[in-house]
Image (spheres, rainbow, N blue to C red):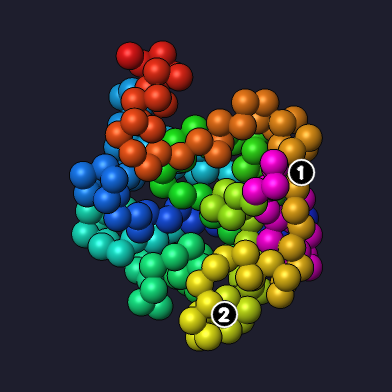
C-alpha cells in the first residue's frame, strides 16, 4: 500500500526527465546505466511502492512512449526546475507529490518515506537542506503550490528559491537526513561523463 502521512494526504511520484544532457553528449540522462539498470528504472523501483501513481515530465515524450507511464510536457516555455514541477503538479491526481530528478539513481526509499512523513495537510513543500544548500528536486510538494508557481513564472521569475517564502515550506535539516540516508547518496546526481565514472567507481562497478 502507498505510504500516507495522514488520512488526507495522498502521494504521487513525479520524475523530471527534461535535462538536455549537453555535457553528456546529448544523451538522455533517464536512460544512462548504472550497472544493469538505467537510471529511470532505478527510480521507478524506488518510488513505485511508496506512491499511488508516477508521472514523467519530459520535453520530448517520445522516448518514454513505450513505458506505460503517463508523460507530460512543460506548459511554460522556459526551462527550469519550476516549469518542470509545474508541469508535473498540474495533472497530478493526488494532494502531494514527491519530486525527483532523473539523474539521481541512488535515491533511497528511506529518504523518500521520511520526507513524506513530514508533510501535513497544510504543508506546501518539504525540502531537504544541508550545508546551506536546498535540494529542491528531491522534495515533497503539494498542488497548493501551483498558484504561487504560476505567479512567479508569469512574472518571468525562474529561480525556485523564490517560491519558498510564498508557501508553507518545511525545511528538513542535515541531522534528520543523515538518519534516513547516512551517506546522503540520494542527492548524488550526474551531469558529466566524469560524474558517471565516479559514480560507477563508488558503486564498485569499475
Residue 13 visible in the picture = no
- Say what secondary structure mark 2 lies in: helix
Asked if the residues shown at circle 1 and circle 2 are in contact, with their CB atoms under 8 angstroms apart, the answer is no
Residue at 51 percent of width and 68 percent of height: 82
For marks 1 and 2, the one nearer the N-term is: 2
Q: Is residue 176 above or below residue 57?
A: above
* Of residues 181 and 49, the one drawn nearer to the viewer in this rendering: 181
Which residue position is annotated with label 2? 152
Residue 55 screen position, x and y as percent: 43, 58
Residue at 55 percent of width and 39 percent of height: 187
Q: Is residue 47 above or below residue 122?
A: above
Q: Quadrant of the C terminus?
A: top left
Residue 21 visible in the picture = yes
Which residue position is annotated with label 1? 173
Does 132 lie within the magenta span? yes
Q: Which residues are magenta?
A: 118-133
Residue at 75 percent of width and 47 percent of height: 172
Q: Is residue 39 above or below residue 133?
A: above
Q: Quadrant of the N terminus?
A: top right
Amino acid at each position: 500500500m502507498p505510504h500516507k502521512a495522514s488520512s488526507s494526504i495522498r502521494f504521487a511520484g513525479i520524475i523530471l526527465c527534461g535535462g538536455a544532457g549537453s555535457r553528456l553528449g546529448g544523451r538522455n540522462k533517464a536512460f544512462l546505466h548504472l550497472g544493469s539498470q538505467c537510471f529511470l528504472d532505478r527510480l521507478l523501483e524506488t518510488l513505485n511502492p511508496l506512491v499511488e501513481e508516477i508521472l514523467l515530465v519530459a520535453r520530448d515524450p517520445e522516448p518514454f512512449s513505450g513505458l506505460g507511464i503517463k508523460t507530460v510536457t512543460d506548459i511554460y516555455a522556459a526551462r527550469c526546475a519550476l516549469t518542470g514541477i509545474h508541469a508535473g503538479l498540474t495533472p497530478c491526481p493526488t494532494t502531494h507529490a514527491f519530486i525527483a530528478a532523473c539523474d539521481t539513481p541512488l535515491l533511497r526509499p528511506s529518504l523518500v518515506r521520511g520526507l513524506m512523513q513530514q508533510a501535513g495537510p497544510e504543508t506546501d513543500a518539504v525540502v531537504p537542506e544541508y550545508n546551506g544548500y536546498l535540494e529542491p528536486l528531491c522534495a515533497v510538494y503539494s498542488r497548493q503550490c501551483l498558484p504561487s508557481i504560476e505567479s512567479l513564472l508569469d512574472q518571468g521569475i525562474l529561480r525556485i528559491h523564490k517560491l519558498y517564502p510564498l508557501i508553507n515550506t518545511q525545511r528538513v535539516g542535515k541531522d534528520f537526513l543523515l538518519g534516513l540516508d547516512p551517506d546522503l547518496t540520494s542527492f548524488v546526481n550526474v551531469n558529466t561523463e566524469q560524474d558517471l565514472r565516479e559514480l560507477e567507481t563508488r558503486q564498485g562497478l569499475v
